[in-house]
Image (cartoon, rainbow, N blue to C red):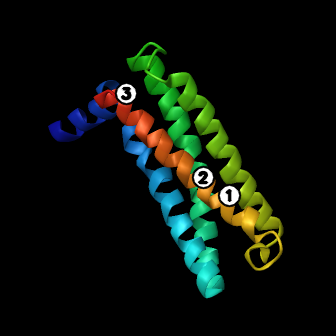
Amino acid sequence: MEFFNRLIHALTQSHPIHPMIVHFPIALSGAALLFILIAWVRKDRNFEMMAFANLVLTVFGTLAAGLTGLYDNNRNYLGEAPNANLKIVLAILMLAVSALTAFLRMRSPELLFSKGKLLYLAGYLISFLLAITLAFLGGVILYGF
């Protein structure tokens, strides 16, 4: 029972929440990009559906990572974490690009196999590039530049 009490205390009082959440949108956007590229090359609808599912999860993961990042920044850095404003802007941009790409795909399931495929592929690529840029800026907070 002592272990669970210490665990709950660490999760709610002392340990930052953001690092536990932030890896999800990074991995999901990377997997989404990988699957969409495989789907594009092989013209495979199954991989396209996997890419889309990962992109939808990226949207929710980005939202969770952003909210926990704001919370931890205010709690641990008093709102003054290095590059905090840049990270907020990039996170909002990542959320918007991922959500818009997912929304467009939801409205047109054949998007990868139509004239709009390059814009659709670009949405996945931009989401992943924003994710790894945000990851780098998060590392700057912990390890310096």
Mark pair 1, 2: CA separation: 6 Å
Which residue is disc 3 drawn over? 141
Q: Do the CB atoms of the residues marked 1 and 2 lie less than 8 Å apart?
A: yes
Image vertical order of residue 96 relative to residue 38, above or below: above
Label annotation for residue 127: 2
Judging depth in this view, the residue of 91 and 56 nearest the camera is 91
Labels in figure, total: 3
Q: Which circle marks residue 100 in the picture?
A: none
Pick the quarter of the image with the N terminus. Answer: top left
Residue 49 vs residue 6, the one in the foreground: 49
Q: Please give left or right for residue 128 compared with residue 140 in the image.
A: right
Counting from the top left corner in percent of width and height, residue 81 is at 43, 20
Identify the element where label 2 is drawn: helix
Residue 49 percent location from the top left of the image: 63, 76
Callout 3 amino acid: Ile
Residue drawn at (29%, 25%) of the image: 14
The alpha-carbon separation of the residues under discs 2 and 3 comes to 21 Å
- Seen at 66% across and 40% down, the residue is 93
Residues at discs 3 and 1 in contact (Cβ within 8 Å): no
User: What is the x, y in percent for residue 128?
Assistant: 54, 54
Give the residue number, with chain letter if any, for mark 1: 123
Q: Residues within 10 Å of mark 2 (few under 14, many from 20)?
A: many
**Label 3 SS:** helix
From the viewer's perspective, tell me whether residue 82 is left or right of residue 107.
left
Residue 88, compared with residue 50, is above or below; it is: above
Q: Residues within 10 Å of mark 3 (few under 14, many from 20)?
A: few
* Marked residue nearer the N-terminal end (3 or 1): 1
- x and y percentages locating residue 42 in the rendered image: 60, 87
Q: Secondary structure at mark 1?
A: helix
Q: Amino acid at mark 2?
A: Ser
Residue 61 showing in the rendered view:
no
